[in-house]
Image (cartoon, rainbow, N blue to C red):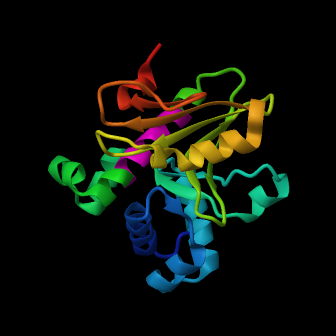
Amino acid sequence: LASLGDVADRAVVARLLQALGATSAAELNIERLSGSLGTPATTIRRHIELLEMLFLIRRVPAWSSNLLARSIKRPKVHIADTGLLAYLVGADQRRIETDLDLGGMFYETFVAMELHRQISWLDERPQLFHFRDRDRREVDVVIEHRDGSVSAVEVKSAATVHERDFRGLNHLKDNLGNKFKAGALLYTGANTVSFGDRLAAVPLSGLWAP
């Protein structure tokens, strides 16, 4: 850490990392972190850049069909490794499996970081985003390909899914038309289930399907 930048107080970085662990898979709110940690926002921004350079965290920018809006909206931030995430929040396997909010955070972080890893193998790498609009329609991962087409992934830490769980995916499909390639809702169930045109619920193991 010290070799990458000027860090006056490493304890501040440690507290920041722990705070980011508590909000992994959430939108990055610099002002809120600054207030909670009692540290200037400029320092928070600089330390976040250092943590990203160390591959401890990763920011996922917001997606919008308006390119300018992408640079304005808040990114999501993920702890890059879920083992580190478990350490930071003090959670074991049983707690992750039984606490729905914590489990959702872990599953989304794991899926987003696994997709990022797999994308790094490709010659023509698509970009990863997240989506949220003013009506609170959300998609956890939006994959924009070089030709402008979009695939999307929603994550749910449950063994059953319902039509309402596809609200964000349906919104993207309806608005993008033929540019929308496919949408998958990854869940902990065992079967792949179609939910209409180009939409399906897919077991988490689908991340590694050939």
On the image, the x and y values in percent for residue 15 come to: 39, 72
Name the spot of residue 20 as percent of width and height, x first: 44, 64
**Is 182 displayed left or right of 15 in the figure?**
right
**Residue visible at 51% across and 76% down in the picture:** 33
Residue 64, position as x, y percentages in the image? 74, 52
Q: Position of residue 163 (x, y in %)?
A: 46, 43
Q: In terms of depth relative to the viewer, which is nearer, 4 or 45? A: 45
Q: Is residue 68 magenta?
A: no
Please identify the quarter of the rendering in which residue 50 is found.
bottom right
Q: Nearer the viewer, residue 136 or 19?
A: 136
Relative height, residue 178 to residue 135 (above, below): above
Above or below: residue 27 compared with residue 174: below
Question: The magenta stretch spans which residues?
Answer: 105-116
Is 108 colored magenta in this rendering? Answer: yes
Q: Main secondary structure of the magenta part?
A: helix
Residue extending furthest toward the top: 210
Count of numbered circles in the view: 0
The residue at the point 40 percent across, 43 percent down is: 162
**Is residue 15 visible to us here?**
yes
Above or below, 136 against 121 in this view is: below
Q: Nearer the viewer, residue 143 or 33?
A: 143
Pick the residue in front: 154 or 199. 199
Q: Residue at x 84, y 58 (%)?
A: 68
